[in-house]
Image (cartoon, helix red, strand yellow):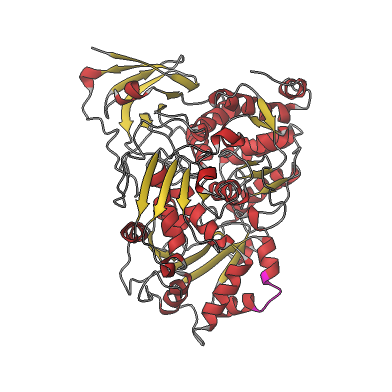
């Protein structure tokens, strides 16, 4: 493997033991990925700070005690604890103490304490073509697809190694030739009403994962007026049901101004037609129980972290049900990051959500912090990603519904849906 | 007669055990409980099985980038599979084994086999993995049947000329 003089210096301990450990892991991963040299990255986003584990704490503290500091601007994914407000949630003290240790270690290495899984919603948003090392599957797919920045899927712990060394294996999606579309997904006879519905995006994403496999999918066509939050929902679902790290949407995402450009002048390896029945099946697969009136124990929103626009929409839907509040026995959680929260706090929206009985948590989520009551058996969410992981990670049944359905169901304590999932509201 | 297979070691090491074969990719986050070695993902066909001590065979991983942390924690806890055999390189799976090695001097071998060799392992086979990436399958002790290649294009009834879970596709990373 070709290493620069500075690479060798880092590897040999000339920049400290922490940096040497980071460089050993980067070099071993280059060998795994059959890259024969390393390349620079100019920003990083750390996922390894999220899961609280013995390995996670030991690894971060080993790096800190070895003197490691990040070389490039580095943001942090959500962590295992709401660092400001954890005492308001029923978090065990020993869990909190360990989470604070892990968080402090990452902050000590010079990371920006963004603590959000939606780092594209705030500070240090990557530029088109920027070479970055990002962890967190929903952030990776968003950075590659929507922003046109370039990252491979960096798993927990190589993310911080890349940040410390500023180097990654030169391969995969960092290189232009590997970013071409491979499989074409054509939307056939999907109505404008469906395309503008909230459910379309997570359902389309949920279907995209298995349809694409490890190939790069090209979607022809998503509506040109898609919002950031819709693309976030689609990407998060696709990166959960599959390993998708990059998709192109013709006429919408920056590397796909045309169908030809999306495929880099080549022909698709395969063409798959997506019809309404496929969306119906994907949507049904997002719920493990779906009966009208089914009792729910919790509503989980903000997966990925809520944006300012989502706070506004949630408050609007709550105000459309005047006088109603979250039913007794139901926990209503909204997860977000500091920057979206700060914007939302400058409007009455947060008060509306709190008066309804909603609880807002910063910095973390229900998967990494035990803030859902352990006796909860059924949760409801508007997130394809949350629907995908909740049964395995939380051991609960899950009901997928629109944001409006989540509000109405929280107020009644049971699943309460609008007539069709494919209409707005 | 034993089958000799030759692959590429992503993380070198020796191990042997019974094969546990997944027909479709599994995300280890949500798909492996590092405290017990069990597979809790209700969306996966191996839900409820235990990986500990098995030669875990899957086409590749998928989903969350937390998978590496889960594997590292599982190795530390002693609940990990004896080895992991893949049809296609999965950097995130390899990473978990590398971090555990660097941190604790403890790991599980991870091997990528070419298509035909990969398909030669059936669920329940006694498999031995060597540090050079080769593997031996003691065929006479096999009890299960191979499930690979039977993934359909979808849970959602998509029509497709090629299964997204088939082994014909090229590496993209």
Residue at position x 26%, y 34% in the image? B147
Q: In this rendering, would A420 be left or right of A124?
A: left
In the image, A240: left or right of A357? left
- Prevalent SS, magenta region: loop
| Placement of B151 over or under B105, stated as above or below | below
Task: Verify whether residue A347 appears in magenta.
Answer: yes
Furthest-bottom residue in view?
A: A323
| Between A309 and B130, the one nearer to me in the picture | A309
Residue sitting nearer the eye, A345 or A62: A345
Residue A129 figure quarter: top right
Work out whether residue A369 can be spotted: yes
x, y percent for residue A162: 67, 35
Query: Which segment is the magenta one?
Result: A344-348
Residue drawn at point x = 52 percent, y = 35 percent: B92
Position above or below: A358 against A361: below
Estimate the x, y position of residue A193 in percent, counting from the top left.
42, 70
Where does the image place residue A185, in percent across and percent down from the top left?
A: 41, 49
Residue A135 found in image quarter: top right
- Residue A335, position in %: x, y? 57, 62
Q: Is residue A298 left or right of residue A31?
A: left
Residue at (66, 27) in percent of width and height: A38
| Residue A134 part of the magenta segment | no
Of B63 and A389, which appears nearest the observer?
A: B63
Is residue B41 visible in the rendered image? The answer is: no
- Name the residue located 59 percent from the left edge and 24 percent from the top edge: A35
When asked about the image quadrant of residue A280, the answer is: bottom left
Which quadrant of the rendered structure holds the N terminus of chain A?
A: top right
């Amino acid at each position: 493997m070709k290493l620069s003089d500075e690479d060798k210096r880092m590897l040999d301990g000339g920049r400290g033991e922490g940096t040497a450990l980071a460089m050993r892991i980067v070099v071993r991963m280059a060998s795994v990925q059959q890259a024969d040299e390393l390349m620079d990255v100019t920003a990083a986003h750390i996922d390894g700070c999220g899961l609280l584990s013995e390995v996670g704490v030991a690894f971060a503290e080993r790096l800190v005690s070895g003197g490691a500091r990040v070389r490039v601007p580095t943001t942090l994914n959500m962590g295992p604890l709401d660092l400001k407000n954890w005492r308001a949630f029923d978090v065990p003290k020993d869990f909190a103490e360990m989470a604070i240790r892990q968080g402090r270690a990452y902050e000590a290495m010079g990371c920006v304490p963004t603590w959000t899984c939606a780092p594209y919603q705030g500070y240090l948003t990557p530029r088109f073509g920027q070479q970055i090392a990002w962890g967190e599957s929903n952030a990776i797919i968003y950075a590659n697809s929507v922003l046109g920045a370039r990252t491979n899927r960096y798993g927990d712990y190589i993310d911080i190694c890349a940040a410390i060394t500023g180097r990654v294996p030169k391969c995969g999606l960092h290189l232009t030739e590997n970013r071409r579309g491979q499989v074409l997904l054509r939307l056939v006879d999907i109505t404008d009403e469906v395309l503008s519905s909230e459910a379309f995006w997570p359902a389309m994403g949920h279907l995209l994962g298995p349809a694409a496999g490890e190939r790069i999918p090209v979607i022809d066509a998503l509506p040109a007026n898609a919002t950031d939050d819709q693309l976030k929902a689609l990407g998060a679902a696709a990166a959960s049901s599959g390993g998708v790290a990059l998709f192109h949407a013709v006429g919408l995402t920056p590397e796909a101004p045309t169908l030809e450009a999306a495929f880099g002048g080549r022909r698709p390896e395969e063409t798959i037609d997506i019809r309404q029945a496929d969306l119906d099946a994907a949507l049904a697969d997002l719920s493990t129980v779906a009966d009208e009136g089914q009792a729910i124990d919790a509503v989980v929103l903000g997966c990925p972290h809520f944006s300012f626009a989502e706070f506004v929409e949630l408050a609007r839907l709550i105000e459309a049900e005047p006088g109603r509040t979250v039913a007794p026995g139901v926990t209503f959680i909204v997860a977000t990051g500091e920057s979206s929260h700060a914007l939302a706090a400058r409007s009455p929206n947060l008060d509306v959500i709190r008066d309804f009985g909603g609880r807002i948590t910063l910095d973390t989520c229900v998967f990494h912090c035990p803030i859902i009551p352990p006796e909860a058996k059924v949760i409801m969410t508007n997130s394809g990603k949350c629907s995908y992981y909740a049964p395995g990670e939380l051991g609960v049944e899950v009901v997928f519904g629109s944001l409006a359905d989540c509000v109405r169901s929280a107020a009644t304590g049971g699943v309460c849906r609008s007539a069709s999932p494919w209409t707005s509201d | 007669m034993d089958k000799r297979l030759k692959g590429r070691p992503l993380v070198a090491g020796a191990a042997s055990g019974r094969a546990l074969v997944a027909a479709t990719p599994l995300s280890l986050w949500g798909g492996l409980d590092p405290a017990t070695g069990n597979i809790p993902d209700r969306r996966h066909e191996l839900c409820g099985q235990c990986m500990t001590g098995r030669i875990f065979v899957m086409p590749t991983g998928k989903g969350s980038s937390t998978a590496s942390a889960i594997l590292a924690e599982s190795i530390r806890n002693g609940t990990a599979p004896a080895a992991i055999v893949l049809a296609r390189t999965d950097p995130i799976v390899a990473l978990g084994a590398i971090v555990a090695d660097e941190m604790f001097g403890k790991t599980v071998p991870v091997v990528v086999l070419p298509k035909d060799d990969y398909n030669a392992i059936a669920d329940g086979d006694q498999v031995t993995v060597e540090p050079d990436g080769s593997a031996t399958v003691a065929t006479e002790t096999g009890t299960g049947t191979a499930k690979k290649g039977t993934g359909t294009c979808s849970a959602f009834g998509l029509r497709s000329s090629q299964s997204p879970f088939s082994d014909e596709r090229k590496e993209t990373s």
